[in-house]
Image: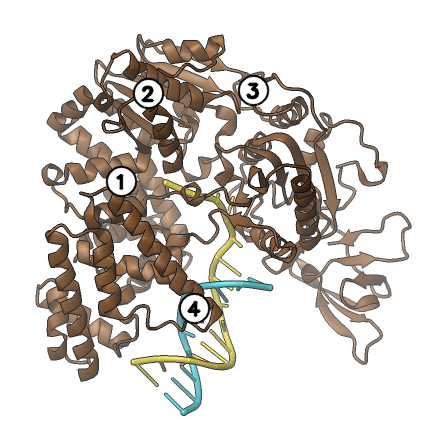
Chain colours: A brown, B yellow, C cyan
Amino acid sequence: MIEVHLNPEQREAVEYDDGHLLILAGAGSGKTRVLTAKIARLLGNGTVSPGNILAMTFTNKAAREMERRVAVAVDPRSMPRMGTFHSTCLWFLRREAGRLGHGENCTVYDGSDQKSLMRKLLRSMSLPGGISPSGALSWISGQKSELTTPAEALEDALTPHQEALARVYEAYQAVLAENNAFDFDDLLTLTLSGLRQNTDIRDCYRSRFLRILVDEYQDTNLVQHEILKTLAGPDTHVTVVGDDDQAIYGWRGARVTNILEFPDDFPGTRMVRLETNYRSTGNILSAASALVSHNTGRHGKTLRSVLENGEPVKVQRVASPPDEAEWTVMTAMSFQTRGTPLNRMAVLYRTNAQSREFEAACRRSGIPYEVVGAQRFFEREEVKDIVSYLRVIVNPRDAESLSRVINRPARGVGKKGQESFLRHASADGVHLLTGLGRACSYPGITSRGGKALEELGDCLNRSVEMVSKGAAAVEIIDHVLAGTGLKQQYDPGDVTEQTRLENIEEFRSFAAQYDIGNPNGGLPGFLAEQSLLTTQDAYSEQGLALMTLHCAKGLEFDVVFIAGLEEGLLPHIRQDRDAPADLEEERRLLYVGMTRARKRLFLTSCLARVQQGRYRAGPSRFLAEISSALPESRNSRDSSPGPSIPCPSGEDGFSKGEIIRHPRYGRGMILSARRRGEEWELSIDFGFDEPKTILSGYAPLIREGNAPGRTGPVW
DNA sequence: ACGAAATCTTTTTTT
DNA sequence: AAGATTTCGT
């Protein structure tokens, strides 16, 4: 058995096995080590066998890491079941497909599938305006997280708007069912209902899983909590680990109450607190603690650092996002020359859009970097195309995926032809794949198009046969690539198309790798696994990591840069909508980011920033909240994180005759100023032939000359 | 049917 | 500002 150094609390958490256990683990307190040691111990002393353990982590990567560590103590041939909550649910649903009565080889729709489906749906329903695809989807997701069915949602609807949404929900579910497809939320809700409605199945899993361990419990939702409650039998010991200060998924239905009220739902729960932080220096930890102490709704805890105070946390003000990126990359490089490998450093930001500047700066400096998440590999056009073909092969009812690729590459079947095809194929009451073979006979399809569809049908049918004979995933991929000419549409001479070809190749080798690891998985298994990869799963630790704060959860780095500490960006504020920003969650998000740092932490803040075509900026209020924990700052000139720059809400007006400075045009005088909604339409003389007309929201105008000492952007 | 140009929506965060 | 979608011309 692996002997690891454990402090008394950790040891207690590892060794306690008399019932349920709640581990409140602060950032960097070694919870992964505890979970791993706990599993290894259970198996090492023969308390239970590997098949009796179910471990659910937040990413597949974490699960694999745990597997790796447990494998030292256990025969790798019989490994406990480890994965994310969602992948465990899909495993269950596929395993029990027969008894639960849904198609075994269902497709899992990801965000972009959902969106395109919803767009089509909304168009076909011709509803009163005000319902956007993403709005409808997030509303539906909310309903599912609360276990509300479409019928119940319809009953509960109080306003016409809600009623319309409920109808969309109903129709959306109908389309999913038609296509034999699930979305991410369905994986959870269907698992729960499957367990609840089939007590025989439930009891089977109850007696199988005698130890269930769940990581990051603060970010689970009601459905996940209910699944856990249902799955835990009388002899099951449940261990959950979490930290209410690190709850950052409230917006998608996660409930911190799950962890805080865990002892109520699991009677006799023992509670262990891990409050010793082994990761960060004292200075980093006290800055992070100072920040999060501003939250009211928390179970206050004290994290103790065992490390030196280290270097102070540094706040760096820069003029603009390009400067921010430049400064960050330069600083990272200087750490590199002093011995810190780039792959132990990370730049964290609030929104994916912020990655661009950093990417550009890295390229200019020629340093290796890795953008984690932003444009996910499996969501690239060319990869998505292959995946869609594969989905149709495994699940021929997936009309959504077929419609994506039916004319890719171009087969001479346009919008009208596709419509006609779908109408006639379904009127024939025939399999979509069989329909392809008959396409020639459908009206509205050109003879060339019909022939191409026939050919496509042959290729797909042939693939279906191969799958049923147990062909490996990569064999099918090769067959599809050869039969559809997907690769031929790209020109290897073109730079971007060359990348697409490389991506196709990468996808192919990804599948080949899967085949090696899962000789019995085949194409269905491969698709199931592929659909549930998380953003972090793709992170290969190759260079300077660029990722969102959400994505950084659970990771740690020697040096961390957190970008964009500006009011409106972090905390993020949506000004137009009525939804009040959850300030406390934003604060926790920054807290999570700060506690990723082991040795050095930098926070950068821009004076001005373009976002959605508008300028906005102003230092984040969080800087002021942290400042008490920062050492006396030396450069007093602009050190006060207070509002030295007015916030966007400032009522500063513009008046005729004022002298201002524009970043591009330089000095100019305002000839006329007119209110335009939230902004000002200004006519300004910059000394060119004609005065320029400028909207105040589009450029930071610096006031010059008047009011000495109050020079700064005017909003 | 298909590509180019004009117009419109849109961004928080992710399984 | 960028991206997606619609419209328009061939």
Q: Are marks 4 and 3 on the same chain?
A: yes
Residue A298 versus residue A448 in the image, above or below: above
Which amino acid does the dot numbered 3 rest on? Asn
- Name the residue at 29% across, 38% down: A87
- Name the residue at 41% across, 56% down: A132
Residue A714, x across and y down, in percent: 77, 54
Q: Earlier in the sequence, mark 4 or mark 3?
A: 3
Are there few (<14), some (14-19), or many (20+) residues within 10 Å of tag 1? Answer: many
Say which of marks 2 and 1 sits in front: 2
Chain assignment, label 2: A
Residue A420, x across and y down, in percent: 19, 74
Q: CA distance from mark 4 to mark 3?
A: 48 Å
Residue underneath mark 3: A277
Say which of marks 4 and 1 sits in front: 4
Q: CA distance from mark 1 to mark 3?
A: 35 Å
Q: Are marks 4 and 1 on the same chain?
A: yes
Residue A357 versus residue A250 in the image, above or below: below
Name the secondary structure under disc 3.
Answer: strand
